[in-house]
Amino acid sequence: MFDEYGFPGAEGSGHAEQTLEMFVYCSRAAEGVDDAEVGRIITFSQARNVARGITGVLVFGSGVFFQWVEGPPAEVEILIADLHRDTRHFDIVTLDRGIEKRERLYPNWEMELVEAEDIRAVLQDALDSAEDENNAAALKRILAHIDSAPLPLLGRG
């Protein structure tokens, strides 16, 4: 079953509840990051995330990343630190973050690339509820960037 943004839900996953940290963010790709580079990111992430117990989705279109990750809190903390050091993107905005005991939303997705067509709506919702001035400013820059070029559709990787 897929949610309103085309992401698979947890229905029928049969996976037990566990303590998971969830991290959702968006960012702008650095100059030169293209579909081929995103493909390399996905390939690397899939292999690495299996060992870390991290699952999630990555949306990329018009130079904007949107990512949802979930996994053991200690491993997600390491991933977040890695993301902030990664020079392939900037204007990183945390959209949601939390730790709770639940089933995974993406139990079989070590990291999947999904269609980008709904990212603008997701980011606009985030901007509408943003309380942090820096996040709001970064979201405005990201939305302006999206508005300057059509979003290509990328299939599951």
Image (spheres, grey):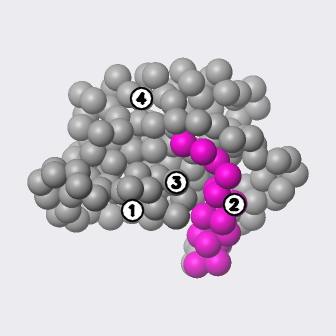
Real-space Cα separation, disc 4 to disc 1, in angstroms:
20 Å
Label 2: few (<14), some (14–19) or many (≥20) C-alpha neighbours in 10 Å: some
Report x, y in % for residue 156.
52, 36
In the rendered image, which residue does mark 3 sit on? Answer: 6
Report x, y in % for residue 120.
69, 60
In the rendered image, which residue does mark 1 sit on? Answer: 97
Real-space Cα separation, disc 4 to disc 3, in angstroms:
21 Å
Q: Is 115 covered by the magenta stretch?
A: yes
Q: Is 87 covered by the magenta stretch?
A: no
Q: Which mark is residue 45?
A: 4
Q: Is the C-beta separation of discs 4 and 3 under 8 Å?
A: no
Q: Is residue 53 left or right of residue 22?
A: left
Question: Tag 3: residue type?
Answer: Gly
Tag 4 secondary structure: helix
Which of pointers 1 and 3 lies earlier in the amino acid sequence?
A: 3
In front here: 156 or 142?
A: 156
Q: Which quarter of the picture shows residue 57?
A: top left
Q: What type of secondary structure mainly makes up the magenta span? A: helix
Which of pointers 4 and 2 lies earlier in the amino acid sequence?
A: 4
Which of pointers 4 and 1 lies earlier in the amino acid sequence?
A: 4
